[in-house]
């Protein structure tokens, strides 16, 4: 089993990475392979709703990490999406990439468990978690929770490590993710199929 952890911060080894690493450590101890993917500090493309990805499993824009991440998602079993908080909302970079991941490669994420984490100096974390979690819930993904909301606080990696409750929350995310993955694996071995999606009705509110 493998979990991909997406670092939506331009800082490769900053606060968000510190939180993701804590989760990865627990997963590794449970025998689950992990990989932390960095969004980096180069420009990323926003989704323009062109529809060019339809039926192709890839985005028409190829200059950033989106298509590489879609390819990796095909063989992954679970995901953690991490973001810093900017102006009380998620990084625009991770939102742009996630929009494209889920439009172009959503079927490779569907029904797989995922967690969202936020890193902030002070505030804006709950709005950030709510925003990114919507990608998961519209795509039928079991959402991994913890013993507190999935956030850490601090302005540097060292300060994040001093957020003892936040770091404990990250470790419990890892433990819960491992448990759900093993439950899913046991279900597959018992012949329990993935639910068949019924999506045939669209209701417009303007008549």
Image (tube, rainbow, N blue to C red):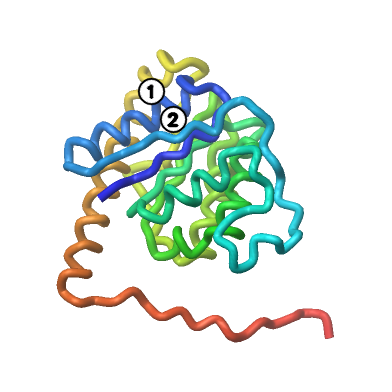
Q: Where is residue 25 in the image (x, y as percent from the top left)?
A: 26, 32
Q: Which mark is residue 152?
A: 2
Residue 39, above or below 98: above
In the depicted structure, whether residue 146 falls above or below residue 181: above
Image quarter hosting the C terminus: bottom right
Report the residue marked by disc 1: 163
2 and 1 marks in contact (CB < 8 Å): yes
- Would residue 171 be found to the left or right of residue 200 on screen? left
Work out whether mark 2 precedes mark 1 in sequence or the reverse, and give the earlier one.
2
Badge 2 marks a residue whose secondary structure is strand
The answer to which of 173 and 127 lies nearer the viewer is 173
Residue at image position (46%, 45%) is 116
Residue situated in front as seen by the camera: 60 or 23: 60
* Residue plotted at (31% across, 39% down): 34
Q: What element carries label 1?
A: loop
Is 204 on the left-hand or right-hand side of 70? right
């Amino acid at each position: 089993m493998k979990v991909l952890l997406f670092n939506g911060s331009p800082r490769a080894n900053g606060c968000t990475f510190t939180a993701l690493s804590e989760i990865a450590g627990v997963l590794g101890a449970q025998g689950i392979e992990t990989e932390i993917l960095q969004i980096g500090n180069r420009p990323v493309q926003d989704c323009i709703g062109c529809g060019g990805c339809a039926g192709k499993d890839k985005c028409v824009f190829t200059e950033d990490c989106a298509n590489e991440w879609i390819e990796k998602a095909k063989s992954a079993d679970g995901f953690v999406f991490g973001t810093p908080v900017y102006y009380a909302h998620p990084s625009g970079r991770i939102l742009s990439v996630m929009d494209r991941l889920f439009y172009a490669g959503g079927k490779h994420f569907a029904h797989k468990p995922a967690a969202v984490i936020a890193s902030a100096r002070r505030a804006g974390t709950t709005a950030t978690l709510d925003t990114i979690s919507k990608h998961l819930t519209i795509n039928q993904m079991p959402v991994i929770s913890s013993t507190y909301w999935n956030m850490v606080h601090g302005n540097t990696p060292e300060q994040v490590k001093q957020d003892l409750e936040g770091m404990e929350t990250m470790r419990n995310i890892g433990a819960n993710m491992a448990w759900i993955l093993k439950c899913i694996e046991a279900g597959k071995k018992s012949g329990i199929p993935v639910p068949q999606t019924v999506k045939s009705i669209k209701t417009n509110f303007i008549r």
